[in-house]
Image (spheres, coloured by chain):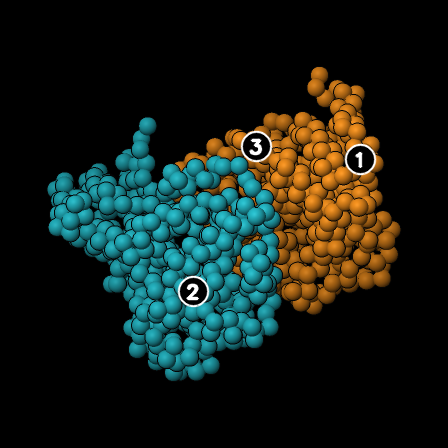
Chain colours: A orange, B cyan
Amino acid sequence: MRKKFLFTPGPTPLPPEVQEALSRPIIHHRTTDYQEIFAEVNEGLKYIFQTQNPVFTFASSGTGVMEAAVVNLTREGEKALAIVGGKFGERWKEILEAFGRECVSLDVEWGSAPRVEEVEKILDENPEVEVVFAALCETSTGTKMDIKSLAELCNKKGKILVVDAISGLVAMELRTDEWGVDVVVAGSQKGIMLPPGLAFLSISEKAWKKIENNHIKAYYFDLKKTRKAYEKTDTPFTPAVGLIVALRESLKMIKEEGLENIWRKFSLISFAVREAVKTLGLEIFSRYPAEAVTAVKVPEGIDGIELYKAMKDRIGVQVAGGQAHLKGKIIRIAHMGYMDYTDAIVAISALEMALSILGYSVEFGKGVGKVMEIFMKEGVFK
Amino acid sequence: MRKKFLFTPGPTPLPPEVQEALSRPIIHHRTTDYQEIFAEVNEGLKYIFQTQNPVFTFASSGTGVMEAAVVNLTREGEKALAIVGGKFGERWKEILEAFGRECVSLDVEWGSAPRVEEVEKILDENPEVEVVFAALCETSTGTKMDIKSLAELCNKKGKILVVDAISGLVAMELRTDEWGVDVVVAGSQKGIMLPPGLAFLSISEKAWKKIENNHIKAYYFDLKKTRKAYEKTDTPFTPAVGLIVALRESLKMIKEEGLENIWRKFSLISFAVREAVKTLGLEIFSRYPAEAVTAVKVPEGIDGIELYKAMKDRIGVQVAGGQAHLKGKIIRIAHMGYMDYTDAIVAISALEMALSILGYSVEFGKGVGKVMEIFMKEGVFK
């Protein structure tokens, strides 16, 4: 009977509407019934991506569409820039190199993000670079990149900008067309409130021109073939029908709530969580904290893995630990998808109690009190 | 209130146990709870693949693992043999060519399959060929290939055999290890009774040796990286957790029923359906009919698309039409997954009524009677 809470930056909890849709009998994908759902979903995706360009859906993890972006947008031997400040920036680099692209990487300390002038400098030093790979939210460190300014720079320089918004989309402000972002990739199990298994990417006309001129080796992730099928409201291969049917439900919920309202909600929740964490005497790991996930430095003398375990196994509240060299050093609390204001209270209360269990001195209610104070001040529950 | 039946060769209907599992709250994949499920599923997959080798699961359509087999097992410029007698044989060829492999294709008429001597001849003419790509069941034509003999030949000649069992697995006899099949690929939405979105492949030690020596360009479908993660009961990228949890349920059901019993069931069902079809004066399209799907020639003067529509929209029974040049020429009735003896009665009764609606002369009950006669004779309902 222990009630459980999932605050990992993917997968995120499923709304009841999505759970219900997932349990429906399966339908065949080459029917008008399915085509209607698929067309509706494609429109809903444009809204959450804030774009008029088509958004393509693949049956894959987010990494699949990262690969799709790399292999379709760049040629073998081509030099491309990746911004690397965490595990997912490294993934851009790894994919580029796996397919024989030359990766120029702008490495920043984990938890930091480059200033736009630094990106400009490296682009000036490498004029052959045509495509820039970055992330809206570097999930491994809870760090936000100023995509608006980066897009401005890329457009000024005639570069194509590809943004990993796998953990950022829906939770964080991203105005794809308005800011001039060319390609945005995302996954189903974060802000979109679905199980993992779908991945998405939107593509600007500027990016299409380069894709059309590239002679590439791809099949499952071939975007030209995908676009051709989409023209007939179809996909080249069997779509993950069950997830698409559920996607219609989550997209409806997001539309009803309003994307800007959701951005504001998670902006406020993440602010309250950061303030609460500081009130407890702990530090925020990132210099540029993202709204979608907060990385908290585990205090001296406390083992981060034990902290994670105490929260999960004793209290029922699951956050994420650190990855790679941050293992045991940070915990990460997600603010995305089917999470609400009260969840921030639950998360901080679990943090207080787990810290206390591990011998860290806590004045119970101090962190949670800070969260409530902020919510009340902002009139959240009015 | 119209009750609907799905007899397409994927997706197939979901059992209630699977529907229930799909609607459960999502869990995180880096937890011991998930690892236990994942380990159980991996064992269950070995059983249905009839292999002691590892079976890897990807979040993708079946085509994704076909690509995985091609890019990991062959090098650029390498000559490989594909047996092509339908849409999915063509897919092997397309994937090989998309990645710059040289495809030698053994083309047979759609609805037919090559004799093993023909394969031997083409292998003798092309001694550089190291890998042979075939299908247990060519879904587009309902045709079965004699994989046992083909595996014998490949082993004799030291070739690696890759079998597309996407529509055949579970429904049709396939003894991977006993017959010496090196690589088997499958999808979730056919015999495995899940929604589409997972794809699987098993790999023999002989195939691994070649994979290890190939320097390949892959990332999402990189099998070496996948194997490394599996050694720690993990996957390189976020798995489709919800589908994996449901997979545990369907694998349990298959184990309980017994694979050989399921093979026998669909062998008898497909036999009864073929006999019923012939009783109605119609012909079976394939010269070597598969147990997993029956392709029925649409009689002269009847439009196959109208026949499909009458069955689906008037009676509620959805079969599949023909693909490519067979569009309108055949209908395909699946015998796989969560389908049972009574379903054959429903399918044939729908065929009788739809034919009659379209003006074809039918003595009602003649086809269905043949089905019942066979089931009774075989003691199905004893």
Callout 3–callout 1 Cβ contact below 8 Å: no
Where is residue B328 shown, x and y percent of the image? 31, 50
Q: Cα distance, mark 3 to mark 1? A: 26 Å
Q: Chain of mark 2?
A: B
Left or right of A300: which side holds A220?
left
Where is residue A203 shown, x and y percent of the image? 64, 48
Q: In the image, what residue type sits under mark 3?
A: Arg
Q: Is residue B100 visible?
A: yes
Quadrant in which the C terminus of chain A is drawn: top right
Callout 2–callout 1 Cβ contact below 8 Å: no
* Neighbours of disc 1 within 10 Å: few (<14), some (14-19), many (20+): few
Tell how many labels. 3
Q: In the image, what residue type sits under mark 2?
A: Gln
* Neighbours of disc 3 within 10 Å: few (<14), some (14-19), many (20+): few
Q: Chain of mark 3?
A: A
Q: Cα distance, mark 2 to mark 3? A: 39 Å
Per the image, the residue denoted by label 2 is B52
